[in-house]
Image: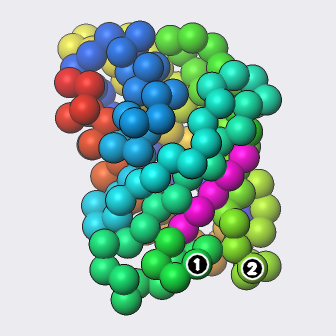
Amino acid sequence: MYSTIVSTVVAAERPVVYWALLDPAAVAAWRVPDGMRGEVHELDARVGGRIRISLTYDDPARAGKSDGATDTYSGRFLELVEGERVVELVAFEADDPDLAGVITMTTTLRDVDGGTEVELRMDGMPDVVPPADNEAGARMALGKLARLVG
């Protein structure tokens, strides 16, 4: 298991960014790497509320972690601090035991010159997911978030 931390500055105020972290349509639009599309099946934005998201490769020949060309993960919200932080506990829906385990995803928002710094930290990433791929995907997603709210 390993951790990934990526951050970016978006040209938007924290309340706008926080909204994009919890709005199902916004999440489907930004929280997906290039070459994939997102689908939010469930997003109950409250402490203890469930979240379930599928990311499907545009190229159906790509192998997903869950089924066919799809990666699905689900979990719950552990902490919600309005305008500051979102903490989720999620796990891949996969039969592969190497993908088992809970990933803690923490998104932290801070005021900076020019907008909001968004830090995404993923703790407990399965070793079978290449760290460079995970970091690249996270950076792509944060870039989409910046374009969505900026």
Quadrant of the drawing holding the N terminus: bottom right
Count of marks, rendered view: 2
Q: Is residue 43 above or below residue 64?
A: above
Determine the residue positioned at 32% across, 11% down: 13
Q: Is residue 46 visible?
A: yes
Q: Identify residue type, mark 1.
A: Asp
Question: Of residues 71 and 2, which is closer to you in this image?
Answer: 71
Q: Position of residue 131 (x, y in %)?
A: 51, 66
What type is the residue that disc 2 sits on? Asp
Find residue 147 and report its image quarter.
top left
> What residue is rendered at 50% in x and 12% in y?
83
Which residue is most to the bottom? 61
Is residue 119 visible to the viewer in this orientation of the structure? no
Residue identified by numbered label 2: 95
Q: Is residue 84 left or right of residue 34?
A: right
Report the Cα–Cα distance between label 2 and label 1. Answer: 9 Å
Element assignment for label 1:
loop
Tell which of 39 and 139 is nearer to you: 39
The residue shown at (41%, 10%) is: 15
Q: Residue at x 26, y 25 (%)?
A: 149
Looking at the rendered structure, which numbered label has been put on residue 15?
none
For mark 1, what is the residue? 67
- Dot 1: few (<14), some (14–19), or many (≥20) neighbours within 10 Å? few
The residue segment tinted magenta is 71-75
Camera-side residue of 123 and 140 = 140
Is there a contact, CB below 8 Å, between mark 2 and mark 1? no
Q: How packed is label 2: few (under 14 Cα within 10 Å), some, or many (20 or more)?
A: few
Residue 50: image quadrant is top right
Which one is closest to the eye, mark 2 or mark 1? 1
Quadrant of the image containing the C terminus:
top left
